[in-house]
Image (cartoon, rainbow, N blue to C red):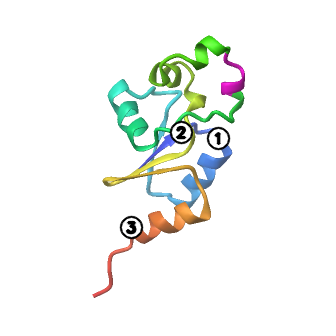
Amino acid sequence: MIIYGLKNCDVVRKARKALPKARMHDVRDAPLEREKLLGFLASFPDTLVNKRSTAWRNLNEAERASDSIALMQAHPALMKRPLIEAGAKLYLGWSAETERAILADQTPDAP
């Protein structure tokens, strides 16, 4: 399991605390490749770029209209976080519902 986000983000910290065995990938320290971001954007086309963030509000109109992938590579804080890759499943954001879903998926079925 991999948690993508910013290590100093409070929401990412909560996810890391709840998922201690997950590997952390700080997108600021190690920017994601275009192909990886394309896959994430395909799964979350309307929500991967956090348009409610301070980073988004600080962009001008021309920047906001540019390529989402290039924007997230240039400004990692634009990506909604955390993005959690658990096997073949992806989860975006952190809530009690997300935590339950991930933990349920990780629990082996009882015989």
**18 sits to left or right of 85:** right
| Quadrant of the drawing holding the C terminus | bottom left
Residue at x 41%, y 29% (from the top left corner):
32
The residue range painted magenta reads 55-59
The residue that mark 2 highlights is 5
Q: Nearer the viewer, residue 90 or 46?
A: 46
The amino acid on which the numbered mark 1 sits, given as a three-letter code, is Cys
Q: Amino acid at mark 2?
A: Gly
| 95 left or right, relative to 44 | right
Q: Which mark is residue 9?
A: 1
Numbered tag placed on residue 106 in the rendering? 3
**Helix, strand or loop for the magenta stretch, by majority:** helix
Amino acid type, callout 3: Gln
C-alpha span from label 1 to label 3: 24 Å
In x, y percent, where is residue 72?
51, 25
Assess whether mark 2 and mark 3 are in contact (beta carbons under 8 angstroms): no
Q: Horizontal and vertical percent for residue 33?
A: 37, 26
- Dot 3 falls on a residue whose secondary structure is helix
Magenta stretch holds residue 57:
yes
Residue 107, position as x, y percentages in the image: 38, 73
Q: Is residue 97 left or right of residue 54?
A: left
Distance in Å between CA atoms under marks 3 and 2: 21 Å
Q: Residue at x 59, y 30 (%)?
A: 78
Seen in the picture, residue 97 relative to 25 is either above or below; the reply is: below
Q: Secondary structure at mark 2?
A: strand
Does the CB distance between marks 2 and 1 fall below 8 Å? Answer: yes
| 10 relative to 6 in the view: left or right | right
In the image, residue 28 lies at what x, y percent? 53, 27
Estimate how packed mark 2 is, as few (under 14), some (14 to 19) or many (20 or more) residues with alpha carbons within 10 Å.
many
Q: Specify which label sits upstream in the sequence, 3 or 2.
A: 2
